[in-house]
Amino acid sequence: MDSKSAIACLSALAHDGRLSVFRLLVQAGPGGIPAGEIARRLDVLRNTLSANLNVLSHAGLIASRREGRSILYRAEYGAMRDMLAFLVEDCCAGSSEICAPLTEVLSRAACCAADKAKPLESAQ
Amino acid sequence: MDSKSAIACLSALAHDGRLSVFRLLVQAGPGGIPAGEIARRLDVLRNTLSANLNVLSHAGLIASRREGRSILYRAEYGAMRDMLAFLVEDCCAGSSEICAPLTEVLSRAACCAADKAKPLESAQ
DNA sequence: CATTTAATTCTATAATACTGGAAATATGGA
DNA sequence: TCCATATTTCCAGTATTATAGAATTAAATG
């Protein structure tokens, strides 16, 4: 990913409404959610939402497909991955004691905890 | 990290000049670089740079300390880590086949490749 | 204290982005 | 075809952000 694309992604996510939309879609999984339901769940105007979905689409962070009268939106995990990779590439001048904690935390992200089965003494 | 802080970080990085500054500081390591040298290396005006350093500072992505006449700036790896973690938390509704590639790529970031490749032998 | 160097703050202008009402487009069904 | 639903596009007003010249603060040194 080049700098221009990364800025488009960062800029798209640097907005309360759009970040909420993106996080909703990330959590929703690859099935996607119709625009109308996104508007309903997040309680936002449809035209405003549409504009924001457009920004996220142009950044490549989400994709859409029509299904009947609805248009379903879903997160583009690949773009998200590329953007995150861009941010951490060539970092720390090669000293892993600085950025190891970074990747460690990321690999423990809640989404994969179940399958990774990494027993980080969960305090339940 | 809460949504508000994450947006401040994303917004700070969603700018060509600031992203360049941040990447320069990330690559430079914890020692930091004086503002003047950042301006020289990136060929930007000092007052414009100062404004951008201020935005990055307020977002918590960089920190500064005075040393003589110079003010040295350095990346705050912790804030960077928290922001990335925020973006991937609770993703994919728990199905790791979606986000496993994401964390995999991140854990292969160039900065840690050297140590990842050499498991235990030459680790100091 | 005056001078030099380093960096910031002030200020005005230009550019860009956000919002929401109204109109338009697309689809499915009676 | 006519209508209801789903979503987008258009547009104008408002707000925010970016830029750069000029002035200012801060530190070191003679």
Image: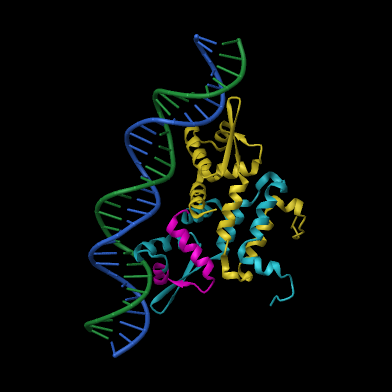
Chain colours: A yellow, B cyan, C green, D blue
Query: Quadrant of residue B39 in the image?
Result: bottom left
**Residue found at x 70% / y 51%:** B100
Query: Horizontal and vertical percent for residue C14?
Result: 29, 49
From the image, which quarter does the C terminus of chain A lie in?
bottom right
Total marks in image: 0
Task: Identify the residue at image location x=59%, y=59%.
Answer: B82
Query: Considering depth in this image, is B75 or B8 the residue closer to the camera?
Result: B75
Tell me residue A13's x, y (percent): 52, 48
Give the overall secondary structure of the magenta segment.
Answer: helix
What percent of the width, then of the height, locates residue B94? Answer: 71, 46
Q: Nearer the viewer, residue A32 or A64?
A: A64
Which x, y percent locates residue B51? 38, 61
What residue range appears in magenta? B14-40
**From the viewer's perspective, is residue B43 above or below residue B91?**
below
Left or right, residue B109 beside residue A15: right
Let me know if residue B48 is in the magenta part: no
At 65% from the left edge and 47% from the top edge, which residue is drawn? B91
In the rendered structure, does residue B31 fall within the stretch colored magenta? yes
What residue lies at 51% left-to-right and 45% top-to-bottom? A59
The residue closer to the viewer here, D22 or B123, is B123
Residue D12: quarter of image: top left
In the image, residue B28 above or below residue B102:
below
